[in-house]
Image (spheres, rainbow, N blue to C red):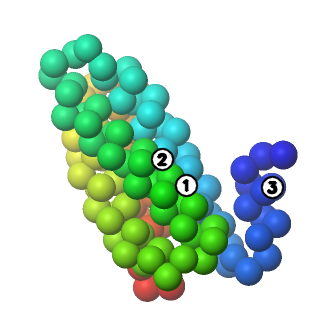
Amino acid sequence: MSLAETVSKIDRLSDEERECIEICNEAAEVCEWCADECLGDEEMEECARLCRDVADIASLHARFMARDSNYSPQLAEACAGACEECAEECERHDADHCQVCAEVLRECAESCRNMMSA
């Protein structure tokens, strides 16, 4: 069963919440990939560091949303901020993995910002 299929079974979630969970998980995955690709390159250390932060916080935010945690709005704010900072760093690099990562992170930041007021 795919993640989207699993998330769709949580009937109390709105479409916007489902989308946010999915994009947070996608952000976590792409950040793990980007961080791994950046390892060993001194110029990419900050990118790897920020990607690892986003991977952790985006994954945590998705889990908190799935269980309807009272702390989800605060995590949404933190996740959006981390995504934006990491996207800015990734955009400084020409590597394909950084460009893909930045694109996903911009979407994730927007989705999390929408969750802050939900």
Q: Residue at x 52, y 39 (%)?
A: 29
Q: Amino acid at mark 1?
A: Ile
Q: Is residue 82 visible?
A: yes
Q: Residue at x 55, y 55 (%)?
A: 23
Q: Is residue 91 visible?
A: no
Residue 104 bears which disc, if any?
none
Q: Amino acid at mark 3?
A: Glu
Q: Which residue is mark 3?
A: 5
Residue 23 bears which disc, if any?
1
Query: CA–CA distance between discs 3 and 1?
Result: 14 Å
Helix, strand or loop status at disc 2: helix
Label pair 3/2, CB-CB below 8 angstroms? no
Q: Is residue 35 left or right of residue 67?
A: left
Q: Is residue 69 above or below residue 95?
A: below
Q: Which residue is mark 2?
A: 27
Is disc 2 surrounded by few (<14), some (14 to 19) or many (20+) residues within 10 Å?
Answer: many
Helix, strand or loop status at disc 3: helix
Rendering quarter of residue 101: top left
Helix, strand or loop status at disc 1: helix
Query: CA–CA distance between discs 1 and 2?
Result: 6 Å
Q: Position of residue 94 (x, y in %)?
A: 28, 25
Q: Residue at x 60, y 77 (%)?
A: 68
Q: Position of residue 46 (x, y in %)?
A: 19, 34
Query: Which label's residue is closer to the chain start, 3 or 1?
Result: 3
Label pair 1/2, CB-CB below 8 angstroms? yes
Query: Which label's residue is closer to the chain start, 3 or 2?
Result: 3
Q: Position of residue 15 (x, y in %)?
A: 68, 73
